[in-house]
Image (tube, rainbow, N blue to C red):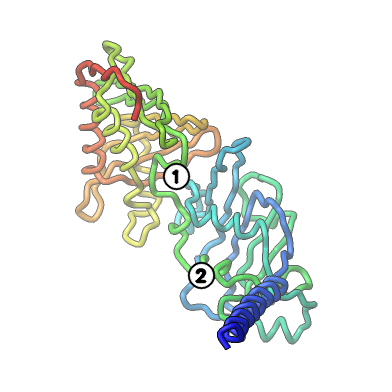
């Protein structure tokens, strides 16, 4: 009796796992890759007024151009997002953040549950005509323009009734069902695609920091080494004035405060002053310039301009360059954040020699 019970339980467990894996395999088989392509540009166009799809939450209102800059083998790419400012008709460009990175990643392998030929009735019922929101994808890294690109255009329509995680889409004459987050991520303001942090990276380490302005020129260099946990440990020194080794606290604090510098306000934020005000605020010579370099070749140049007041808050207008890829349009960092950065800079300027313990890095 005991042996029969064991056999029954074993058979039940076997059938359960067999059913589970067959179901999983069958599920995976229903999803196919429509394409595998390394796109370099993606031009987003918002839906037109005549579009019959779901309009809330609202889509980004203006065309956006996303670009991917390759940096070489095993180096993460750089992304940018550009648009035309409706008020001044000027081109504005900023570094793209994780939303842009994920967009290119998701679009490089487009997965769909089905592929069907389009018909007029399907286009009407799923709102997939020419007035639908769309992405114009190209394998060429072209100059910034909002004219149609040579490549593919994917239109987004209504969500699939039987699967809310999928959205109807059209590429040429074929109807697809990719994941709905591909379209939903554009139901936001354009600022949601911008990298606010001025010094931002993943992996590697900063090799040098240099500040010029306010009557001083300070530079720190870093010869970081990996410890037993495969993590970089900074070793900062100051080559300006008297060359000295910096205390880890002093060097790391300057790095930390440089990473805290961010675009607290964009000209076109909901409470922003507009690009006409931003342009006027950055027409004079900068009061200070900060340059940071990274072990994988990043080079940031951040220019700080005289203080500006907006809505009772004091800011520093900023122009930033990410060499050699692009120059950003103006943004504003809070004066308090800037002063914290200056205090960390003065800490490096006034530092005394640090005697490093004679031991291995832990």
Taking depth in this image into account, of 327 and 262 the one nearest to the observer is 262
Q: In the image, which is nearer the foreground, mark 1 or mark 2?
A: 2
For residue 176, side relative to residue 223 (left or right): right
Front in this rendered view, residue 144 or 264: 264
Q: In the depicted view, which residue is nearer to us: 22 or 110? A: 22
- The residue pinned by badge 2 equals 59
The x, y position of residue 15, in whole percent, is 65, 81
Residue 356 is left or right of residue 57, and the answer is left
Picture quadrant of residue 54? bottom right
CB under 8 Å between callouts 1 and 2? no
* Residue 261 image point, x, y percent: 32, 42
- Residue 96: where, in percent of width, then height? 50, 50
- Residue placed most toward the observer, 355 or 244: 355
Residue 328, horizontal then vertical, whole percent = 46, 42
* Relative side of 361 to 348, left or right: right
Q: Can you say which quadrant of the picture contains the N terminus?
A: bottom right
Q: Secondary structure at mark 2?
A: loop
Q: Which element is circle 1 on? A: loop
**Residue positioned most to the top:** 242
Is there any visible trace of residue 263 in the rendered image? yes
Q: Residue at x 44, y 49 (%)?
A: 195
Identify residue for label 1. 329
Numbered tag placed on residue 310 in the rendering: none
| Placement of 191 over or under 206, stated as above or below | below
* Residues packed near mark 1 inside 10 Å, few (<14), some (14 to 19) or many (20 plus): many
Asked where in the image residue 159 lies, by quadrant, the reply is bottom right
Quadrant position of residue 189: bottom left
């Amino acid at each position: 009796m005991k042996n029969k019970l064991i056999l029954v339980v074993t058979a039940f467990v076997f059938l359960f796992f067999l059913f589970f894996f067959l179901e999983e395999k069958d599920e995976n088989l229903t999803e196919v890759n429509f394409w595998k392509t390394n796109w370099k540009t993606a031009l987003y166009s918002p839906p037109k007024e005549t579009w019959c799809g779901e309009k809330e939450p609202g889509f980004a209102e203006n065309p956006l151009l996303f670009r991917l800059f390759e940096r070489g083998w095993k180096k993460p790419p750089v992304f940018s997002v550009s648009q035309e400012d409706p008020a001044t008709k000027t081109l504005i460009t900023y570094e793209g953040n994780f939303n842009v990175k994920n967009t290119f990643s998701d679009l490089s392998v487009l997965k769909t549950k089905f592929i069907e030929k389009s018909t007029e009735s399907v286009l009407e019922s799923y709102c997939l005509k020419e007035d639908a929101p769309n992405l114009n994808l190209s394998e060429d890294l072209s100059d910034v323009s909002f004219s149609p690109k040579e490549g593919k255009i994917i239109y987004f329509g209504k969500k699939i009734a039987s699967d809310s995680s999928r959205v109807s889409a059209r590429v040429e004459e074929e109807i697809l069902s990719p994941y709905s987050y591909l379209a939903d991520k554009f139901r936001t303001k354009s600022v949601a695609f911008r990298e606010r942090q001025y010094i931002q990276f993943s992996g590697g380490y900063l090799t040098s920091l240099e500040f010029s302005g306010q009557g001083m020129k300070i530079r720190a260099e870093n010869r970081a080494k990996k410890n037993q946990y495969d993590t970089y440990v900074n070793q900062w020194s100051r080559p300006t004035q008297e060359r000295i080794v910096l205390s880890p606290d002093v060097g790391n604090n300057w790095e930390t405060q440089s990473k805290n510098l961010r675009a607290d306000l964009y000209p076109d934020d909901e409470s922003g002053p507009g690009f006409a005000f931003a342009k006027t605020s950055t027409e004079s010579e900068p009061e200070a310039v900060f340059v940071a370099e990274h072990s994988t070749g990043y080079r940031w140049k951040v220019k700080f301009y005289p203080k500006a007041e907006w809505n009772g808050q004091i800011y520093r207008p900023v122009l930033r360059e990410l060499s050699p890829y692009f120059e950003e349009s103006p943004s504003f960092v809070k004066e308090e954040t800037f002063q914290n950065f200056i205090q960390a800079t003065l800490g490096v300027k006034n530092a005394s020699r640090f005697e490093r313990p004679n031991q291995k890095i832990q």
